[in-house]
Image: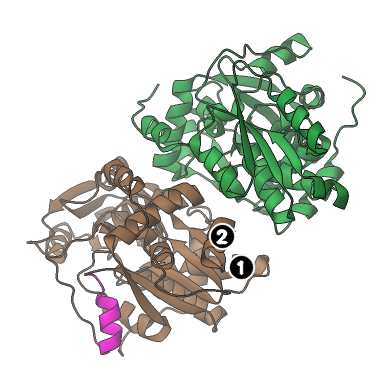
Chain colours: A brown, B green
Amino acid sequence: MVGHLLPTLHDIQKAARRLNGFAVKTPLFPSFALSERLGARVFIKPENLQRVGAFKFRGAYNRLCQLSDTEKSLGVVAFSSGNHAQGVAAAAKILGLKATIVMPSDAPKIKRDNTLSYGAEVIEYDRKTENREEISQKIARERGSILVPSFEDFDIICGQGTAGLEVIEQGQEIGVHFDHFFCPIGGGGLISGCGTAIKTLSPKTEIFGVEPENFDDVKRSLAQGERLNNDNQSDSICDALLTPLCGSMTFAIMQKYVDDVLVVRDQEALYAVKYAYESLKLVVEPGGAAALAALLAGKMDVTGKTICILLSGGNIDQEVFKKALTTSYC
Amino acid sequence: MVGHLLPTLHDIQKAARRLNGFAVKTPLFPSFALSERLGARVFIKPENLQRVGAFKFRGAYNRLCQLSDTEKSLGVVAFSSGNHAQGVAAAAKILGLKATIVMPSDAPKIKRDNTLSYGAEVIEYDRKTENREEISQKIARERGSILVPSFEDFDIICGQGTAGLEVIEQGQEIGVHFDHFFCPIGGGGLISGCGTAIKTLSPKTEIFGVEPENFDDVKRSLAQGERLNNDNQSDSICDALLTPLCGSMTFAIMQKYVDDVLVVRDQEALYAVKYAYESLKLVVEPGGAAALAALLAGKMDVTGKTICILLSGGNIDQEVFKKALTTSYC
């Protein structure tokens, strides 16, 4: 894909400076339990510990803090299944601007409640019959507001990439070089940004994305060499990853940097939520646990490797969490 | 209290070198949500992310790795409500020695199961009618094994103190000086070690312990100037903190370094477990959440202060966790 100015490491480093003091520099720590189980040296990058409980705050703040005063005065609009919603709402609150969020009517309650708690206005739509982009664009036009995309945006990608930059920097501090990096894929913003930072600083680190079953558009798109849709009638427990189609910019970046994509079933994602609760002592949502799920389900042999698993979010409704706790090994 | 050789910062630094590569250097990170709620600048030291899910691995490994070969060949015995059990069992497994653990029959299932999973032998006793020290001493005598105390031991205290050493070092790395440090108290091993490290490196940081209601022996003992018992017929949801009496060494150290002790009710501890799940995305057990509970319940005004809250463990049975999730604000 030509025509896009793609983010570089330098752009991600600039984003990191903007986020300093506003985002959490989430830790990188080893899990001895998981290392033993996978026969690998395993480190966790827990973005569920990020402000708003998901990595999305990084991109949202990096985008919003660069708005002009005029743009700020007109507010922002975003569409999101929940974590981008919270990221935009929280960043808008910090910067003192109004946020309007278009959310699917079946979004987790915790995500909707949190978004409202940051002072945003929430407008619901039906994920299966309505087009969230059209609704959002209409609102943005009417109000003169900036539409803040959830992944297909230079500054959003740079913001998300700061998580990958931290992974490499934190690894270097403790003398660790990663063979593999695993992270979930929705629209591709996170893996695009992280992939750019990681491959630039550590070209031999292989980047693996993980998608939910029925939402494996990126896997199929990379194989096909062009962007393919998901069937938006499908469902998955991984609500954070239900993107109809990745972006043309994120696709171009993923073509450069993503080595392969793994796919997980609902049951595997729920088991990973339970595993994170029991053995990592972390609260992770199903989509946020997708990369962990792929490894626990043995989708790839990582024996003897040094790996980093990014957990992308922890905003999960109690009902789903309790259901996950009853899941047996799959 | 005279007669004890008390640990110094130097001893704790030596313990930190022994633990390097074996224990998790748990992160220190800010919580914006909690900072906003308490009107303070709040950092979390999550020892639930430690190996075995609690700080206890630090002390156990520091003690066991210094045994002579002859001592190692005879194995070790410990008594514990669960987290020290797991710490000793895991350290023994790493060092290739046999561990026998005397546990109360009402210990959480997860703690018993994990202890067994590290290959230890578990012997049960009735917390309300039997004396765990006598049982353990008898086994140790019969087998010629070393008895590994859960808190009243120089090397155990030094090991636990490495958590406090990390708090100060990690704070310094990001330019943060703590006004207050909060941590749970059972037998006093953790707060003694952490207090020693913290007060030596940062004399102005005030150290606050937190005990469960009916197990406030340290609060009463410090006020009285001598060690007082708890009524061992009492109960508390904070199973990790149900110590009949603190140690004479830990008491001597606490007299030097502990500024005050707060007390929390069961309901407050359960609410803190829920808060950690919802807003910190961490799995914490009731006793492990005691310090957080005290602050959420407003036991002390920390407005404008920079504080560190240590979460000491995350080994909680599902039933208790689910019960905590239904707790409303108290």
The CA distance from mark 2 to mark 1 is 8 Å
Judge whether residue B207 is colored magenta: no
* Quarter of the rendering occupied by the N terminus of chain A: bottom left
* Quarter of the rendering occupied by the C terminus of chain A: bottom left
Residue type at tag 2: Leu
- Badge 2: residue crowd in 10 Å (few <14, some 14–19, many ≥20): many
Q: Check disc 1 and report its element: helix, strand or loop.
A: helix
Instruction: Give the answer, above or below, for where A4 lies relative to B316.
Output: below
Q: Residue at x 68, y 24 (%)?
A: B132
Position of residue B71 in the picture relative to residue A217 (left or right): right
- The segment highlighted magenta reads A215-226
* Mark 1 belongs to chain: A
Tell me the tag on residue B78: none
Closer-to-camera residue (B323/A149) = B323
Closer-to-camera residue (A227/B215) = B215
Instruction: Give the answer, above or below, for where A118 lies relative to B103.
Output: below
Image location (x, y in percent) of residue B34: 47, 38
Q: Can residue A251 be spotted in the picture?
A: yes
Image location (x, y in percent) of residue A143: 16, 57
